[in-house]
Amino acid sequence: MDINLSQKQGHCARRDKRQSARMPSKAPFLSSSVRPEAAVPSNPSPRLASGLALAVLGAVAFSGKAIIVKLAYRHGVDAVTLLMLRMVLALPFFVLMAWWAGRERQGVKPDALHWRDRLGIVWLGFTGYYLASFLDFAGLAYISASFERLILYLNPTLVVLLGSLLYRRAISPYQWLGLAISYGGVLLVFGHEVRLSGEGVWLGSSLVFASAVSYALYLSYSGEMVRRLGALRLVGWASAVACIFCITQFLVLRPLAGLWTLARKFGLFRSSTPLPARWCPSSW
C-alpha cells in the first residue's frame, strides 16, 4: 500500500510540473518591479493645450458680451428687450444641448427626470441664468463694461464665502488674503468709476454684484444635480428654462409693437418693403 501511495504522489507531482510548464509566464504589468505610471503611457500635452485654448476662448467671449450689450444700449434698446432677443436666439441651441446629453448611447439610456429634478431645474434656471442675466444687463446701463466684468469675476470669492456659510467649509489664511486683495482692488476701481460716471455707479454696481451672488448660489446648490444628471444635461435644461422666463418677461412688460419698431431701427425690415397691413403689429 505504501508503494502504491508513493507512485500516486510521484504521478501527481509530474502532472503538476507539466501543467506549470504549459502555463504562460507572469505578465510584465503584474510584476511588482514595474511602476503603475510606467505601465500606462500618458501624454497630457495635447489635452492641456486644447483645454487652455478653450479656457482662453471662453474668457474672451465672456468679456466680449458686456461690450456688445453696451453697444446695443446706444441704439435705445432696454435690458428686457435685449435679454429677450438674446434668449430667443439661444433657446434652440440649449434644447439641442439637453437632448444630446440625454440621448441613449451604446444601449444605455440616462435616468428619466423625476419631479424633484424638474423643480430643481426650474429653480436653478431662475436663479442661475434668468435672474443673474437680467441683473447683469440692467446694471450695465449704469456702469462701464470693464467695471462690470471686474465685479463678476468676484464670483469665485462668493462661492468660497457661501461654502463657508452654508456648508461650514474652512477658509484658509491664503484664501482670506486673496479675498482681501480682490475686494480691495474692486473698491479702488469703484472710487474711480464714481468720479467718472456719477451717482448711477452705486445702482449699477449693486445690480451687477447681486447678479454675481445669484450665480454663486446656483454654483453652490447645483453640485448634487450635476452628479445625478450630468453637467451638459443640467445646463441645457436650466438655460432653456431661463430663456422661457426672459421671453415671458418681455411679453408681459413690453408690447409687440415695440419689438417691431426695434426691428426696423436695427434694419431687419426696411420701410420701403411692401408688407400686408395685417402683418404690422400696430394694426392688431
Image (cartoon, rainbow, N blue to C red):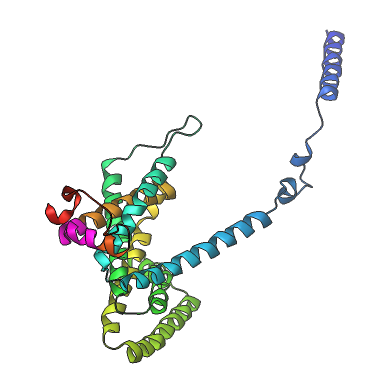
Above or below, 208 against 188 in this view is above
Q: Is residue 141 left or right of residue 32?
A: left
Q: Position of residue 279 (x, y in %)?
A: 19, 49
Above or below, 79 against 234 in this view is below
Q: Position of residue 120 (x, y in %)?
A: 29, 50
Q: Nearer the viewer, residue 70 or 266?
A: 266
- Residue 249, by quadrant, is bottom left
Q: From which residue to which does the magenta span run? A: 249-261
The secondary structure that most of the magenta stretch takes on is helix
Q: Nearer the viewer, residue 191 or 176?
A: 191
Q: Residue at 34% across / 92% down in the picture?
A: 195
Question: Residue extending furthest left?
Answer: 284
Q: Quadrant of the N terminus?
A: top right
Q: Is residue 152 visible?
A: yes
Above or below, 193 against 208 in this view is below
Q: Position of residue 43 (x, y in %)?
A: 70, 53
Q: Residue at 46% across / 83% down in the picture?
A: 181
Q: Position of residue 218 (x, y in %)?
A: 34, 60
Q: Residue at 29% across / 40% down in the picture?
A: 114
- Residue 185, by quadrant, is bottom left
Above or below, 193 against 75 in this view is below
- Residue 66, by quadrant, is bottom left
Residue 160 included in the magenta stretch of the image: no
Q: Is residue 131 visible?
A: no
Residue 257 included in the magenta stretch of the image: yes
What is the total number of numbered labels drawn onto the structure image?
Answer: 0
Q: Nearer the viewer, residue 10 or 180?
A: 180
